[in-house]
Image: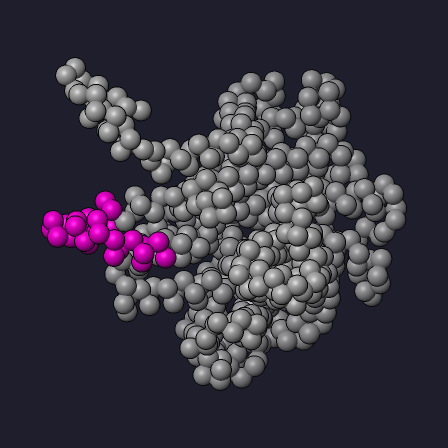
């Protein structure tokens, strides 16, 4: 923690003063609190395992996710080389599950990034500029907020067909609203702080102040909201897939797997149970991490 | 008060206008038409059908005509169900969705508030942890997981309740759909209530009430609860949206003749007018609920000024 100040010749008194003055940064504190939160740490470990499984798992399964095996139709778990069983076309559930998890996580990540970019820029600009522009920009958010958005996503899917890029964009475009509100609120309180005044006095323009001073200081609440948005996005995608409007076969996502499992559950319970479990565990670990982060970064109730 | 309502209505109108516009052009941009059937219509017949519904005119004229109709409360005829108007279809199908939605929200509020208060009063004790664990599970288990699993266990394996169908709204047919819709709402409501209650119980006026020697029961009911459920009122709008989303899944799984099921089918069949009608209906519903929530908020919280 101390590092560079231990140069030869530095006097002992100055050294201790430096140490005391240095203290712990906001992020050190947050990290400490986060690591003390058992649920959050558990969530991080489980999520780490899931991500690893989704990224490298598909390379190690004995079957490909779209490989049809006529003789293995409805194979129960632990038979014919299928650890988690096979589906109505004899496709290996484990391979499909790992691929589906990969697709769902990717959608969660990409759509959240889309919402992050739109939301942060929109909110920061509105909050920073203030006045009439703020009024108009936030009114737009209000209006969009009161729309039954799921219908628009459905319409979008129906209109342009279900392609995976569109799913990213559609869900991302829905999720940015809350983000922009959070960011605007924070920006409003940040823009009158002394260091912003100082930057302006030093001649930095509006764009520079937003990019260099406002946005980095928004990080805390934004990080929290991001970890809570990812599960929401995964849920939204699965919901669309469940209605038959999301990811199309033979590609899989957790939602399509659960939908197929629900159709065939009387014959093959494993097709419903394993994807559902994966879904629930994934959502829970994200939520635990998100809650933990919120308590760590914004410890109102300590 | 009146001015506030007036202003909110003034915002609601452009919102609805935006909804109508976006939905109209999105629907029209979709490939395919409502008249694509199993048999290919001959060009002459197709032209006749298009002319009958005014769809041979330029798009902006159709849009103008549609808007004019909507303003007069006319949502047009269905393009798939030959002799029905969109209003009739809405009227025939809203009952299922309304029954499910209302029962769920009432049940969820009763159960969620009780659980939340209980957890807050026993903060950091076993009851609290149990309730909050259940709440987290409720948030993390989506309706499209609970619904099929409940059907599999309770309807198929145990045979206690019917697995699908409306059956004229008979209670056994309603139980599973309502439970599925209620669970996630209970989870959210109990979390909101607990958070509100924990904060309120620490506040000065509760300490004053305690110091006065009021019985705990009375403090909780008369003083704390009223302030603690305020966040719930703001949740009314999102709750309605959540229920509507949930009803899409539930009506599909339980094969119920409600609006949600109709919406997805109509969108896939390109039944333009029906889809538009439903979007307008739901948007209006959510706008009205948000307005009611704001008003309730003002009534319950004397600190809020409607300006």
Q: Which residues are magenta?
A: A185-213
Query: Is residue B187 in view?
Result: no
Given the current orientation, which residue lies at the most extreme right position? B159
Number of numbered discs: 0
Q: Position of residue B251 (x, y in %)?
A: 70, 57
Which residue is more in the foreground, A209 or A12? A12
The residue at the point 74 percent across, 57 percent down is B178
The residue at the point 72 percent across, 48 percent down is B147
Secondary structure that dominates the magenta span: helix
The residue at the point 41 percent across, 62 percent down is A141
Q: Which image quadrant is residue A256 in?
A: top right
Q: Is residue B188 above or below residue A107?
A: below
Query: Is residue A265 in view?
Result: yes
Q: Position of residue B302 (x, y in %)?
A: 52, 74
Q: Is residue B50 above or below residue A276?
A: below
Which residue is more in the foreground, B89 or B42? B89
Q: Is residue A48 above or below residue B113?
A: above
Which residue is more in the foreground, A197 or B243? A197
Q: Give the side of residue A128 with respect to residue B52, left or right.
A: left
Which residue is more in the foreground, B15 or A9? A9
Q: Position of residue B146 (x, y in %)?
A: 71, 45
Q: Position of residue A132 (x, y in %)?
A: 28, 69
Placement of the N terminus of chain A among the 4 image quadrants? top left
The residue at the point 58 percent across, 53 percent down is B198
Q: Give the side of residue A123 with respect to residue A62, left or right.
A: left
Is residue B121 on the magenta stretch? no
């Amino acid at each position: 923690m101390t590092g560079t100040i231990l140069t030869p010749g530095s006097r002992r008194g100055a050294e201790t003063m430096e140490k005391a003055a240095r203290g712990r940064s906001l992020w050190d504190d947050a990290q400490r609190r986060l690591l003390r939160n058992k649920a959050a740490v558990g969530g991080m470990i489980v999520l780490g395992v899931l991500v690893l499984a989704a990224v490298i798992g598909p390379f190690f399964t004995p079957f490909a996710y779209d490989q049809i095996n006529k003789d293995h139709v409805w194979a129960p778990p632990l038979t014919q080389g299928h650890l988690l069983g096979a589906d109505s076309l004899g496709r290996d559930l484990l391979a499909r599950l790992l691929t589906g998890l990969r697709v769902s996580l990717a959608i969660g990540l990409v759509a959240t990034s889309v919402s992050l970019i739109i939301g942060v820029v929109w909110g920061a600009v509105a909050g920073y500029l203030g006045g009439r522009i703020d009024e108009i920009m936030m009114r737009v958010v209000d209006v969009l907020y009161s729309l039954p958005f799921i219908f628009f996503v459905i319409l979008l899917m129906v209109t342009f067909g279900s392609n995976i890029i569109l799913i990213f964009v559609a869900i991302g475009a829905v999720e940015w609203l809350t983000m922009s509100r959070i960011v605007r609120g924070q920006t409003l309180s940040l823009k009158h702080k002394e260091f912003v005044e100082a930057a302006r006095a030093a001649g930095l323009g509006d764009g520079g102040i937003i990019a260099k001073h406002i946005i980095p200081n928004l990080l805390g609440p934004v990080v929290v909201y991001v970890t809570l948005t990812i599960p929401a996005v995964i849920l939204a995608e699965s919901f669309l897939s469940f209605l038959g409007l999301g990811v199309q076969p033979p590609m899989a996502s957790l939602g399509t797997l659960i939908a197929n499992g629900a159709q065939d559950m009387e014959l093959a319970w494993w097709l419903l149970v394993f994807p559902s479990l994966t879904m629930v565990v994934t959502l829970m670990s994200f939520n635990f991490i998100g809650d933990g982060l919120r308590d760590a970064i914004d410890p109102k109730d300590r | 008060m009146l001015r506030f309502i007036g202003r909110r209505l003034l915002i609601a109108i452009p919102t609805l206008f935006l909804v109508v516009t976006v939905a109209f052009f999105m629907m029209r941009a979709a490939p395919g038409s409502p008249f694509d059937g199993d048999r290919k219509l001959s060009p002459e017949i197709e032209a006749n059908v298009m002319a009958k519904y005014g769809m041979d005119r330029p798009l902006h004229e159709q849009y103008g005509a549609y808007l004019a109709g909507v303003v007069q409360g006319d949502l047009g005829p269905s393009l798939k169900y030959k002799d029905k108007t969109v209003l009739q279809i809405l009227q025939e199908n809203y009952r299922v969705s309304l029954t499910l939605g209302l029962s769920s929200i009432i049940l969820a509020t009763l159960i969620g508030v009780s659980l939340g208060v209980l957890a807050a009063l026993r903060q950091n004790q076993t009851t609290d942890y149990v309730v909050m664990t259940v709440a987290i599970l409720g948030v993390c288990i989506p309706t499209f997981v609970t619904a099929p699993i409940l059907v599999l266990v309770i309807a198929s394996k145990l045979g206690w309740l019917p697995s699908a169908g409306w059956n004229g709204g008979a209670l056994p047919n309603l139980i599973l759909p309502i439970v599925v819709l209620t669970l996630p709402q209970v989870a959210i409501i109990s979390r909101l209530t607990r958070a509100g209650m924990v904060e309120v119980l620490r506040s000065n006026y509760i300490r004053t009430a305690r110091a006065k020697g009021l019985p705990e029961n009375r403090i909780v009911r008369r003083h704390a609860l009223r302030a603690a459920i305020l966040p719930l009122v703001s949740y009314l709008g999102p709750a309605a949206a959540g229920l509507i989303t949930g009803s899409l899944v539930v009506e599909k799984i339980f094969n119920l003749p409600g609006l949600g099921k109709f919406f997805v089918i109509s969108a896939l069949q390109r039944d333009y007018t029906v889809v538009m009608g439903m979007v307008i209906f739901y948007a209006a519903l959510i706008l009205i609920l948000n307005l009611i929530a704001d008003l309730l908020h003002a009534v319950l919280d004397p600190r809020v000024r409607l300006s």
